[in-house]
Image (cartoon, helix red, strand yellow):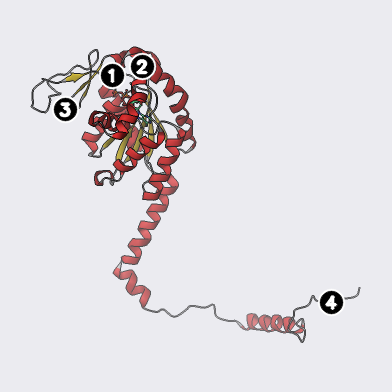
Amino acid sequence: MRIVLLGAPGSGKGTQAQRLTELRGVPQISSGDLLRDAVARGTDLGIRAKAAMDAGELVSDDLVLALIRERLSRPDALHGFILDGFPRNITQAEALTKMLGSLGQPIDAVVLMDVDAGSLMKRLTGRRNCARCGRVFNLHTSPPNADTPCVDGTQNHDLRQRPDDREETIRNRLEVYAAQTRPLIDHYRNLGLLRVVDAQGDVDTVFERLESAVKRAGPARSQRRMATRRRTAAKRTRSPRRQAKKTARRPLRRKPVTQKRAVKKTQRTRASVKRTSKRGVKRARPRRPK
Ligand code: AP5
């Protein structure tokens, strides 16, 4: 499974990607998490990305692409991945297509998490992440409970608010999304890869919808048909019975030449010889005078 989760900040990409990862066992690759990790470790890339992140702007494409390229090359991503928050603009989308094309691993689907803009602010201001287990919570809609224990089995989560989850920064992130990321909806729709999931409602309901959208995801019907044909052809060649049949030469069956056909053939040959000049070049048959 190779999918992209697309959607506005707070649409639930991270929450749903975590669940899908637990269920399907493919890694969640979040460009935001990779960048935050680089900032926390104080790497050169992190230092260069921090200002843009704090302002709610997009980090430059070359930095993000370098991170994603490195992450996709790790062994756990070879059998699938969930891209969360990447790509964010057309340049990144085209770079991703190229990158995956060279690995022979095209995207199966791009899932748009569709949420009413009015609920995004509440979701984002109420968001808290646990610094220990990495779970995403919401003070209003999904606070920690017995079903969401931390790494030590207790409910003692170390809840933190993201620095970019302040109202002014959220407003800018939403504007950046509308201007730079939303055009990807048409981009992927035109490529036939877009699936839209209604991401409004409780987390479980949204997950059910996402699951069924992902099940439907996959290569286009024509690609699937080609793959089936290739598999069938490969099976046939491998089959020992078929190989034996192939090697045992069967006499060629030809239509018996009847006397009538034989005469016709001779006539045709004579006519063509007549029309051939001495130099062996065929000439047009001279017209009969009327
Ligand atoms: P990033 O971390 O990717 O943030 P984002 O895309 O803005 O998305 P969020 O993580 O804020 O939201 P989400 O959709 O994951 O929602 P979540 O599940 O957490 O990026 C951060 C920054 O990094 C960017 O601003 C940019 O600077 C930089 N960056 C990242 N990628 C980049 C790229 N490719 N190029 C350039 N720059 C890049 O849910 C939010 C809250 O809602 C949670 O509290 C959750 O509990 C709650 N919630 C979830 N689902 C529901 C539900 N169904 N009902 C009620 N509440 C819900």
Label 4 belongs to which residue? 286
Mark 2 or mark 3, earlier in chain: 3
Q: Answer whether labels 1 and 2 touch (C-beta < 8 Å).
A: yes
Residue 272 image offset from top left, x and y in percent = 73, 81
In percent of the image, x 42 and y 48: which residue is there? 223
Q: Which residue is mark 1?
A: 163
Marks 2 and 3, how far apart in space?
Answer: 26 Å
Q: Nearer the viewer, mark 1 or mark 4?
A: 1
Mark 2 or mark 1, which is nearer the start of the sequence?
Answer: 1
Q: CA distance from mark 4 to mark 3?
A: 94 Å
**Residue type (three-letter) at the residue carrying disc 4:** Pro
Crowding near pointer 2: few (<14 within 10 Å), some, many (20+)?
A: some
Q: Nearer the viewer, mark 4 or mark 2?
A: 2
Mark 2 highlights which residue? 169
Q: How far apart are the alpha carbons under marks 1 and 3?
A: 19 Å
* Among the 4 quarters of the image, the one containing residue 276: bottom right
Q: CA distance from mark 1 to mark 4?
A: 93 Å
Is 2 on the left or on the right of 150, as rendered?
right
What residue is shown with label 3?
A: 133
Q: Secondary structure at mark 2?
A: helix
**Disc 1 versus disc 2: distance between alpha carbons?**
9 Å
Q: Relative to residue 273, is residue 200 depicted above or below?
A: above
Identity of the amino acid at label 1? Answer: Pro
Furthest toward the bottom, the residue is 278
Name which of mark 1 and mark 4 comes first in the sequence.
1
